[in-house]
Image: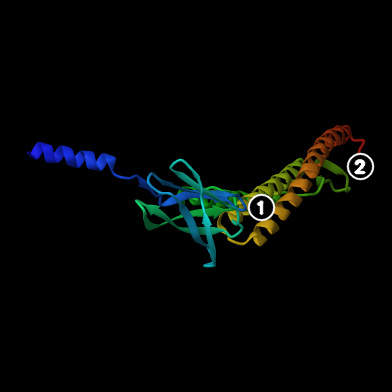
Amino acid sequence: MKKLILFLFICMFLLSPIYAAQDSLGVYGQNDCVDLLQICGTCTYNNVTSIVLPNSTRNIIDVEMTRRGAEYNFTFCNTQVLGDYLVNGVGDLDGTANAWAYDFSVTTTGKEFTQQKSTFYVGSLIVLCFLFVISLLGFGALPGGKFTEEDNSGEIISINSLRHFKLIFAGISWGLLTMISYLIWNISVAYLETGLLAGIFQTIFILLMIVAIIGLPVIFAYTLWSIVNDIAIKKMIDRGIFNG
């Protein structure tokens, strides 16, 4: 008798109507269209009644979802506001109206920003800022003059070779500043709900990048030219035919 009751219970469980509702649809990009899905094996309809936006604005939808077998769908494209969206709906499970709800998130990139990503961004920014300060200190510590020593008569007797490293430090500093602006731009895109600051940092990065693309090759070429020129001057000094 107990086996029969257990068998009937299992059959009732397996044959029970299927009505699946997810807690979350996941993460989507800003201004992307989102397919709001619902699955119900015994429903004749499913309606999206309302959608609550991240700014607490409630959009009354009251539209019937498109049916394909046991799957229902409604495409929602008003995803300009960043944050969490709450979707409310109703379906006639077994002929009785049953409410359902789930949410989805909208970010500028369409990706979820975890604690690990936050740690990586902040750690990278700290390292780049530290290297940038070191490069500035190195740039300021190096001498900029071309000649370093003169004899009693005022004639040049040596060349300042360290000045070439000053130009190299200048290029490194500019490159690090460009990377810092790029990282801040990405952080603002990922974590700030307004796109104003993200646009400002994007503009700064683009300007720094343009100058870097043009300026770094110029610095490199000028450094090579200066090295070759200083070698020629040093030879003249060694021969005693250069007086500045």
Q: Reply above or below: 96 against 66.
A: below
Secondary structure of the residue carrying tag 1 is: helix
Residue at the spot x=53%, y=57% of the render? Answer: 63
Quadrant in the picture for residue 198: bottom right
Alpha carbon distance from label 1 to label 2: 46 Å
In terms of depth relative to the viewer, which is nearer, 183 or 3?
Answer: 3
Callout 2 environment at 10 Å: few (<14), some (14 to 19), or many (20+)? few
In screen coordinates, is 5 left or right of 31? left
In screen coordinates, is 54 left or right of 203? left
As shown in the figure, which amino acid type bears the numbered disc 2?
A: Asn
Residue at the spot x=76%, y=41% of the render? Answer: 164
Callout 1 environment at 10 Å: few (<14), some (14 to 19), or many (20+)? many
Assign the C terminus to one quadrant of the image: top right
Measured as percent of width and height from the top left, residue 41 is found at 38, 44
Measured as percent of width and height from the top left, residue 239 is found at 88, 32
Question: Which of the two discs, 1 and 2, sits closer to the camera?
Answer: 1
In terms of depth relative to the viewer, which is nearer, 94 or 76?
Answer: 94
Q: Which residue is mark 1?
A: 181
- Of labels 1 and 2, earlier in sequence is 1
Assign the N terminus to one quadrant of the image: top left
**Residue 160 seen anywhere in this rendered image of the structure:** no
Q: Which residue is mark 2?
A: 243
Quadrant in the picture for residue 172: top right
Measured as percent of width and height from the top left, residue 242 is found at 91, 38
